[in-house]
Image (cartoon, grey):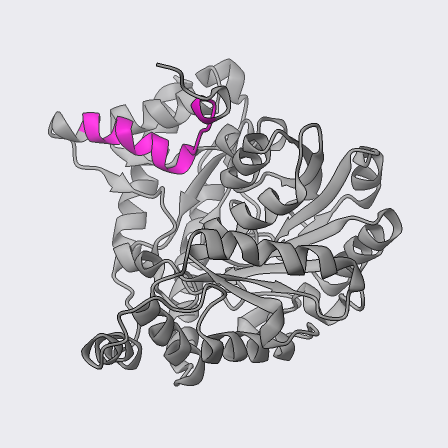
Amino acid sequence: MKVSRRVAGVEYAIRDIVLAARDVQRRGVAIDYLNIGDPVQYGFQPPENVRQALIDAVSRGENYYAPSEGLPELREAIAKKESAKGLSVSADDVVVTNGVSEALDMVISSIVEEGDEVLLPGPYYPPYASYVRLRGGTPVEFAMNLEESSVDIDDIRSRITPRTVAICLISPNNPSGVVFDKKSLAEMVRIAEEHNLYLICDEIYDHITFDGDGGGGRFAGVGGVAGTAPVIILNGFSKVHLMTGWRMGYVAFNGASAHLDGIRENLPKLARVRITTNLPFQYAALESLRGPQDYIGKFVSEVRRRRDYIIPRLNEIPGISCAMPRGAFYAFPRIEDCAKRFGGDKNFVMSLLERKGVLTVHGSGFGEQYGSGHFRIVYLPDIPVLESAMSKLEDFMASSSS
């Protein structure tokens, strides 16, 4: 029976690689899982007041369909959060979604048609390219400087064509940990305005920052420089608020931009088609915004401690080099002479898994142009786990060079 060519071509390296790990595990090999950016799987949990809010919502009967655009109180709280970061936004500019993935799907579905092009930061989070291709569009990578946490403005300008409809940013970045400063963000806003392009900014890791602008949780988001530009924020509760399995996200439109009137009117139709998001979890998300925020600082401190261990350790291994991530919880090391020594980054990752039981993700899964020759590590596990994995990686590199 027929299967859509576009669906058959969808890839998601982060989870696809788990299938290979299961085969290795069935052979009795213990696996160090450094592949999925899920804090909850590594022992971090939402605070008690947030869990209790979920239980209370279920207990008092909040188990019916919510409004398609989201619980009004939650939309108000989200607007307040994004306003504090500088965006001109009201509750009417917010749509609550089933995670950022659905938010991204809705936005791409609303703006991309056959032959359109969307600019993505290289390396990029895989679903961006997948959703663009599913709608008949073409993802186009632009260059980032991983060492300086900046974008190549000239490169972006050179890639804009009459078919370009949007520029996407992920800051803090997955997979590299790059956090863009206000100057870079302002330049991106200027380009979007000059060329009448949507600027789609994924800020799901907004308070997980360590250095420079926005360091220590004081995030410098695009909202502060958005002005009247057609900026669309994607965000949610999975990472900062430790609610990955609860699938809570949102779209927030720049209320000061008249250019967004069309999508602001039409995207909610997609929300109505899928009916709603989970109502009890929306009450939990509301509590996560209204309640005490001290747990976020504690979580970020733990993540920074892991980062400060693993990056120097990676750079001590011959044949491996890694820029210092400024946010999120990912490292994106480069493999020296990867194609020659290992036959490519995917072969490197598979060999490391099979020989040492360390599961990472091949860099080309985040875009061939700028991801090839790299691999991504999630540094959320306890430091003893990271120490063990780094020793195995070091042994692997030493044996591969002999």
Could you say which quadrant of the image residue 296 lies in?
bottom left
Camera-side residue of 389 and 17: 17
Any part of residue 171 in sight: no
Q: Percent x, y for residue 225?
A: 76, 67
On screen, residue 4 above or below 121: above
Q: Residue at x 27, y 26 (%)?
A: 20
**54 to the left or right of 132:** left
Query: Who's the residue at 73% across and 59% down the image?
Result: 260
Q: How many marks?
A: 0
**Left or right, residue 29 beside residue 390:** left
Q: Quadrant of residue 265?
A: bottom right
Q: Which residues are magenta?
A: 7-24
Q: Does the magenta stretch mainly form a helix, a strand or a loop?
A: helix
* Front in this rendered view, residue 244 or 5: 5
* Residue drawn at x 50%, y 40% as measured from the top left: 127
- Residue 130 included in the magenta stretch of the image: no
